Structure formats: C-alpha cells, structure tokens
Amino acid sequence: MPVIVAEDISKKYIIDHQRKNGSPSLRDIVTEKVDKMFSRKQDNSDFAEKEEFWALRDVNFSIDQGDRIGIVGHNGAGKSTLLKILSRITEPTTGQIKIDGRIASLLEVGTGFHPELTGRENIFLNGAILGMAKSEIRQSFDAIVDFAGVEKFLDTPVKRYSSGMYVRLGFAIAAHLNPEILIVDEVLAVGDTEFQKKCLGKMRDVSESGRTLIFVSHNLTAIQALCNKSFYFEKGMLIDQGETTHIVTNYLSKVSHKTLEKHWDNIESAPGNDQVRVKRFKLFPEYQDDLNHIDVRTPINFQFEFWNLVEGASLNLSMHLYTFTGECIFNVGTQAETFSKGLVSGVCEIPGHFLNDGSYVVSMMIVKDTSTVLYNMEEALIFDIEDYRENVTWYGKWPGYIRPQLNFSIRQTEHVVND
Amino acid sequence: MATQHTITIKAGGSEKDYWKDLWLNRQLLWILSKRDISVRYKQTLLGVAWSVLRPIMTMTVMVFVFSYLAKIKSDPGVPYPLMVLSGLTIWTFFANTFTQISNSILINGNLVSKVYFPRLLMPLSSIAVGFVDFLIAFGIFMVMTLFFKHPISWNIVFLPCFILLTFITSLGFGLFFAVLNVRFRDIGQLIPFLVQVGMYAVPVAYSSTLAKGTWFEKYYNLNPLVGIIDGFRWCLLGDKAYFNPQSLYSTTIISFSILILSLIYFRKKEKTFVDHI
C-alpha cells in the first residue's frame, strides 16, 4: 500500500544574477527603480537578470509502506529540494504529494538547539520543534539520554558539549520520534564511527518495524546496507528507480570524472618533444563480479606507450600515484634500457586489495640516463576506486590511502576454565 | 515535524490547514516562549535585576533632563516621575515586543530552513520576553505609586484593554517589519532608530496636552500609540491624567487595520522566507 504518492512534482527557483551576495539591500532595489524611472527604455531587464532554474522537474514516484528508499545523485541534483518539499519547508511549484502517516524529517541534527540551554532543556525544545508532544518526550527521555550517552552532562549548557556529544544528543532525540515515515538527510557525515554504527542500527530498527524510511546520503555503502530501493536523481529529474544494487551500479558508472585513457595516433601532434612523444596511456581494470566499476578488490594495469626518436637512448619510466588532493602515495620506476628508434611500451600493475577507496591521479615520467626528465606527463589519468566490504557491519569511511590485505590474524592463546 | 495522518502537499496547499496547524503547534509556541525567557539573562552578572534597573535608570535620567533641566510640566495633580514612569512602562513594552517581533524570523532562521511549522509561531513566541519585562516594570510602577502616595484609580479595571491594544499594535507593526527584515537587512539597522525617535513622537516624557490646539494635532492623534499611552496613564493615575476617550475609537480601528494588513502581508510572504534566510 503506497504511503507516499508524488505526481508531477516540479520546483522552480528564480536565480537573480544581478545580486550575488544573498539578500538585496534596500539600496539595490531603490537604485534599480530609480534607474528604471530615468532610463525610459522599455527594456526587458527583468527577464535578463532573472533566470529560471528547475530544481525538480516532473518527478513521479510512489513509496510503499515499509520501503527503505535511498536517494542518490550529484550535489544539486534535487535531492535536498525533494526532502524540503516532503518536509513542507518549501512548496512545490506544481504537482502534488499525498502522504499517509505521521512524518518526521531529520534534515539536520539538533535543529533549534540553543547553546545556552542545558542538555535537558534542549531535549524538550528540540523534541517540540520536531513535533513531539511533551508527554512523548517525557516517556522516552531516559532512552534518549541513554542512547546519546550524556547522563553526566544533562545539566550542562550544550555550548560546552563536544561536537560529538552535540550530534549524539541531536540524533538521539530524532531517533525516538517514532514516526510512521522517517526522512533522514546525510546525518552520518558527522559523529564518530561508534556512533555512526548506532545510528545505522537505529535506522534499521525503524525500517524493520514496518515503518518507511527515506534516506539521502553520499555514503553508498550505507545506502546499500539500509535501503531496498533507490531513486537516482540527475539535474532535477528522477532518471532511474528500482533495486538499490542496480541503481548504485548505474550511478557509479555515470558519476565519476575519470580519465581512463589518453591516446594520440599522429606523432606530429602528440605531446612530447624531439626526443620522445607519447602515443598512449591507458588503464585496464580487471573487473570483479561482472561489475563495471573499480572497487578496492580490482587489480589495475597501466599501459604506457611512447615513440622514441633518438637512436640508442637509455630510458626508463617513472610513475607517480597521487591522491585527488595531491599527496603522493608512491613512486615506482622501471630499470633503464637502451632503445632504438620506434615504439616503446611499459606496463605497471597495481594489485587488488591495495589502494583504499577514493580518487587517484597518475603521472608518468620518461627519464633519460636515469637522471634527466625528458618528458613528464602530469595528471595523465584520473580514476576512482569504490568501497567494497565483506563481513563488516561498519560503514564509516575507511581511513588511510592504502588498504592492503596483510597477514593479520587472531587466535585464542589460553582458555580460562571456569570452576 | 509531525502532523496529522493524511496530508497533501501542493502549491498553496498549506493555506487550508494553516490555522489548524497553528493550534496543533501551541505547545511549541509555549516552549519557544519559555526558551526566549530562560536564555534572556544567561551569562549576565546581574541577571533579572536588569529588568528592574533599566526602567528605574531611564526614568531617573528623564526626570532629570525633562523636568529638572527642560522644565516640562506634567498634568496638574500628577507627579512628573509617575507620569514618565507610566508612559515609559507601556512604551517600553511596545518597543521591546515590536523589536523582538521584527527580528523573530531572522533569529530563528535555522528553524525556517529545517522544519515546518506555521511561521506565525515565531513572532508570537517572541512576545513573551517583552511581556515579562512589562510585568516587572509594572511592579516597579506600583511601588513608586505607593512611594509618591498617589491614589490608585478605579480606572485600573480598563488596563487590560490598553495592554491588549499595545500588543495588537506591536504585532501589527512588528509583522510588517519582520517580513521586510527577511528580505532587506537594512531593516535591522532601521528598527533601533525608529524606536529611539518614536519615543519622542509619543507622549512619554510630556503630556499630550502639549499638542492640543497645534496644527499637527490631527496627525499626532492618528498615531495609535498616543491614545494607548494616554489611556494607560488614565487607568493608573486617574482622571487627573489627560485622556480623550474619543481617541479610543480611532486607536482601535487603526491598530486592528494595521494588524490585519500586516497579517495578510505576512501570510503572503512567509512561504518565501526560506529562500531569503
């Protein structure tokens, strides 16, 4: 039975190009009006300055009771606008949504917390803001305090809380809302890993008790773990919906800005100089499980081909791998060899289970006599590695640049015999 | 945010259930009011004493400047300090609530963009602080009446009417400026200035008999606060204080018209608050 039915939802915003910094001041408006009075031009400046922007366009969907819906898409794809409409913070420009059931939305943790008030006072304040009756808050007060783990600080103003405590208290209140439909926006981005686990557990409880969950996150692992169905938004349109695994794969194959290959057929226009010219730099992933994206298990081969234009040159290759933010993870080089004129090709393999998930950038250098850099092809290839985990119930960001599988084991070394 | 069981969201959809939602959220109104009151004097040395000190200090300064230096006369038979203090009490109530209502949407901006509830709750809840201050100032006034041995008049039974009128007027002006304040941050600069100048435009430091017979009397009396302050004084100080009961009609009509117009304006604009916060 559908609990939410959306028909042709669209939301239009007017972008004001003239005013870039927030609200226009009165002076702007007055100047504009005066300008208009004196310049008698019947111009259409109004139309020129304002541009329509459709944050959502003709969105249709229906959500059944007990569904756990994940929403994926780029920043600006319309996810947040949809949540705002569902939470009634803003109205759709056209279309309508029918919602059957008590709905609670958690777009932010600790909405309306007042820094000067104590934890206790803020529980009542925030609960009321989220729509709980006083009696309900009183009923679940102990559970909230317990979940957040702030017993000792109940009578301390929340401005003295650590950011972790603040977030925990905020989520704890929301988690005890007991709505029939729960809307959650990216709250897992904050808080420590222990707490993230608790949140996901709580959200799973919500869905298992037959209630409906709508969850927006950039953490695809969490979405895959929690949601049975997903919506994929792009440029304000709902372009795909269905089983979560299917949607996530589809999303991943479309989102990355990767450069997996560069090649030049014409030696004249190829990058390089009068000694070497680059023909091809290509990345070959050995995909696992019929998936067409690279995850932490995937071995990756790099093939680099160039024209050597100098007879008898002693050359070697040197490859740098950087994180997307520019830290160098490693540098590997080949042995130097003597080549005659013609094509030279080098291959490097990065094994699976080596790099952590993230975006990586590769540069390749051609070095002469193991000392002179003939040509450095910077930021030549860019690729993403997606997360993949097995037998793990924790979904926080895995730390580190590399994620090697090392021989690391535990075993029992002594048995304590109970008397 | 929690609402009743079945809702339909569409453009203009919130119109129908607006007043019902407002009623359903009355607990939130109460809690927001309580919040504003309890954070008022947090981390101050003197705390609530400020609510007592401020009116006394202002009165002292005004008595000194207007009575002692400028030699302004009060209505015959009314001690000047009592005249100033009564005017000041009701004017401060108006000024405080007006300022707080005007800023209420911006101050609660984080709520506007994160949860739904009828936006009118925010201006309504911001009245509480001003009212508490008013009660304290009123207590001070009563003590001063005893001190000056001025008899308390039976007119005092009409006092709630004038308090209500002040409330309506401040809500009327406040709602209008609250909407403008969201759109134009200039209003935040303008409000303290309006309040400062406003105090001289209404009979706080002087009696409105001074305006009698002048060319601007007509316009002067259009200001609803003139009638309210005169009436408030008349309730507390008795028939010796000047009050023209005729002005009550125009005051009431003007106050209510302003409130209704502002309310319409507020309701029309509240949906776009989230875009400007």
Image (spheres, coloured by chain):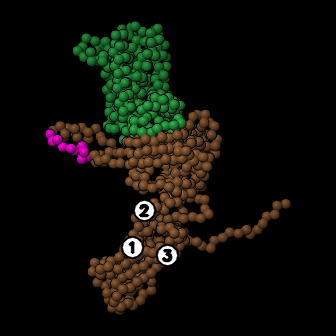
Chain colours: A brown, B green
Chain under disc 2: A
How far is disc 3 from disc 2 in space, using C-alphas? 24 Å
User: Between A353 and B222, which is closer to the camera in this rendering?
Assistant: A353
Residue underneath mark 3: A350
Give neighbour class at mark 2: few <14, some 14-19, many 20+ (Cα, 10 Å).
few
Q: Residue at x 39, y 48 (%)?
A: A58
Question: Which numbered circle lies on residue A254?
Answer: 2
- Comparing A369 with A259, the one in front is A259
Q: Chain of mark 3?
A: A
Query: Which segment did they paint magenta?
Result: A39-49
Q: Secondary structure at mark 3?
A: strand
Query: Which residue sits at x=60%, y=46%?
Result: A210
Q: Is label 1 in a helix, a strand or a loop?
A: strand
Does residue A309 sit above or below B194 in this rendering?
below
- In the rendered structure, which amino acid carries the disc numbered 2? Lys
Q: If you read the primary sequence from the N terminus, does the residue marked by circle 1 or circle 2 appear first?
A: 2
Q: Residue at x 41, y 15 (%)?
A: B232
Residue A137 can be seen in this image? yes
Q: CA distance from mark 1 to mark 2?
A: 16 Å
**Quarter of the rendering occupied by the C terminus of chain B:** top left
Kindly identify the amino acid type of the residue bearing the numbered disc 1. Answer: Glu
Residue B80: assigned label: none
x and y, in percent, of residue A117 in the image: 53, 38
Residue with the mark numbered 1: A261
Closer to us: mark 3 or mark 2?
A: 2
